[in-house]
Amino acid sequence: MVNVGSAWKDSGGTMKYADKINKYRREELPDLYKTVSCWAPFQAIHINKKGKIKPCPFSMQGANGFRDQVEWSPNKSIKECWNDITLDNIREKSETGFLHSSYCDYCLNQCYKDKPPSSLDYDHVGGEKSLYHEYPKEIELELSNKCNYMCDACSPWCSSEWVKKLGLENDTKFHSIFDDSVYSAAFVNDLRTFIHQVYRINFTGGEPFAQPIVYAILKMIEEEKADDVKIHFTTNGSVMNSAVKRMAQRKNTRFTVSLDSINPDTYPLIRVNGNLQNVIRNIDYLIETNDNTVGASFVLTKKNIMELPSIISWCNEKGIRFSYHILANMGYRDQKEIDNISIENEEKDYLLSLKEWLIESRNNISKGKDRDLCDKNIGMYNQYIERLK
């Protein structure tokens, strides 16, 4: 039973962020859950290549965001990090309907602009909701930037190819502590101690199937016979080795392919080093082999936005779950490069025209056999239209 406060206003009468966020929440979400502004700090942790921990990938990005960041090490377990006072402070704000001014800058800005914040994702993440989980239920692992792609929306933080391109190979900021066998073994053993209490592990990157630490964790999960633990891979879809095939046959396993385009002319311009034909072939294998819904995600930019209706149709027809991301400068990139392809930085006239075109094009989107999935994909399409302000 979730134990949350019922007040909607603070003593000064200021509107809470929960009020703004609730405008975009699904109607079927229990009212009791809606008093919490964001469920991420109660359900989830994100761990990066340096062992730094935060509730979600979007948190701690403000000016003061890294001031008190929690950090895993062989001397500080995941459970100790989970109970760190820094995360407790974030939970306190979320529980009372607010967002932490230092750690939730991204969603605060989205609320300020009256747009759907990323915190909405965590209404449906991590299984059963509780304010008092002993361990994190949802674990997102971004343990390396090793990747064979150099996508135009990416940066050296998530792509070793961008590291090479920018000549940053000797910059230790982009090195992973998990390349050290001592750290890697300690981390895997730490996860082993509570793996049966985890709801889901999400592997991201870089490219997860280019990371030795990912294979070590998967081996541990198999050894522990943790068949009930859900596994989610966010992958570029370029790798189809025996481990990927074995995971495709495992129950409780999902794949989301970062695709960005289904146009053979556009794809190589966005997903540099990628081969669309190979990726589509691997997606088809996953659809045929994996009992769970395969997903595809798209970073929406000027390069692919006119594809969006056909992308939704393609996903509907193939039975693929659609998701999108908003372009942001991930660091070490010329801001002009980002601005040149960014949609949200455009003038209001452009955004209004695009919004009207997307609304008109909605009537041409084809439906697939799975009507529930189609409705969800159209829902994501509509949510993106709502962002164009």
Image: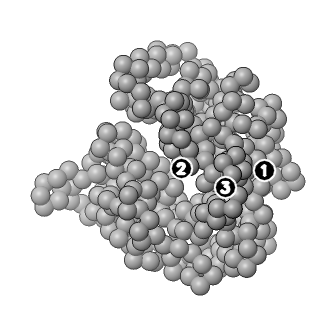
The residue carrying pointer 1 sits among few (fewer than 14), some (14 to 19) or many (20 or more) residues within 10 Å by Cα, namely many
Identify the residue at the far left of this view: 12
How far separated are the C-alphas under marks 1 and 2? 33 Å
x and y, in percent, of residue 223 in the image:
79, 73
- Compared across the picture, whether 260 is left or right of 237 comes to left
Residue type at the position of mark 2 = Gly
Q: Earlier in the sequence, mark 2 or mark 3?
A: 3
Disc 2 crowd rating (10 Å Cα; few below 14, some 14-19, many 20+) is few
Residue lying at 35% horizontally and 70% vertically, measured from the top left: 89
Identify the residue under disc 1: 248
Gap between marks 2 and 3 measured at Cα = 13 Å
Instruction: Tell me the residue at 31%/59% (across/down).
Output: 101
Q: Residue furthest right?
A: 242
Which residue position holds label 2? Answer: 331
Q: CA distance from mark 1 to mark 3?
A: 35 Å
Whichever of labels 1 and 2 marks the residue nearer the N terminus, that label is 1
* Residue found 41% across the figure and 27% down from its top: 346
Residue 45 against residue 134 in the figure, above or below: above
The front one of 289 and 270 is: 270
Front-lying residue, 225 or 63? 63
In x, y percent, where is residue 41? Answer: 43, 64
Write the residue at 59% across / 60% down: 140
**Residue 269 figure quarter:** top right
Instruction: Classify mark 2: helix, strand or loop.
Output: loop
Number of the front mark, 2 or 3: 3
Hey, what amino acid is under mark 3? Leu
Image quarter for residue 266?
A: top right
